[in-house]
């Protein structure tokens, strides 16, 4: 059902899972965002939206992805890699993952 798991404690990444094929939203023309341009919006007690503060609030290019807390882990859904979810053991590591280039 999902891809393999791996552990990378240096980055805080616990493992990744590949989602099955299906419809997805993508923002592939968005360049990686520098840390100072990240905007983290608290959506609920366990969910955050990560965006590029340089983009207009109404633009779909503003949204880089979402973070959801699952137990002690933080799951990242990056719009650049919509079929791949990453889990981190720290919120700050999950947020920092939006400043790196992801494979497509």
Image: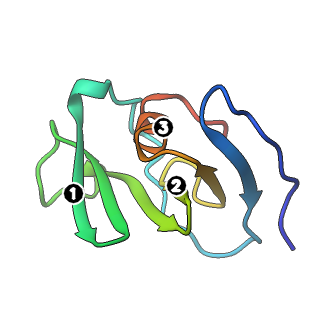
Query: As drawn, is 102 to the left or to the right of 54?
Result: right
- Which comes sooner in the sequence, label 2 or label 3? 2
- Which comes sooner in the sequence, label 2 or label 1? 1
Residue 89: % across, % down: 57, 47
Q: Which mark is residue 41?
A: 1
Circle 2 — which element? strand
Q: Residues within 10 Å of mark 3 (few under 14, many from 20)?
A: some
Residue 53 to residue 36: above or below = below
Residue located 13% across and 61% down the image: 58
Rounded to the nearest angstrom, the CA distance separating label 2 from label 3 is: 10 Å
Please tell me which residue lies in front, 42 or 62. Answer: 42
Q: Which-is-in-front pick, marks 3 and 1?
A: 3
Residue projecting furthest to the front: 72
Residue 96 to residue 26: above or below = above
For label 2, the residue is 76
For label 3, the residue is 93
Residue 98: % across, % down: 44, 38
């Amino acid at each position: 059902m999902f891809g393999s798991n791996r552990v990378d404690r240096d980055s805080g990444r616990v493992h990744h899972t590949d989602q099955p094929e299906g419809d997805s939203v993508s923002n592939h023309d968005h360049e990686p965002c520098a840390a100072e341009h990240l905007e983290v919006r608290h959506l609920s007690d366990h969910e955050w939206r990560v965006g590029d503060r340089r983009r207009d609030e109404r633009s779909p290019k503003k949204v880089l992805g979402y973070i959801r807390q699952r137990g002690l882990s933080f799951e990242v859904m990056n719009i650049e890699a919509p079929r791949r979810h990453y889990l981190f053991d720290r919120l700050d590591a999950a947020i920092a993952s939006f400043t790196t280039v992801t494979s497509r």
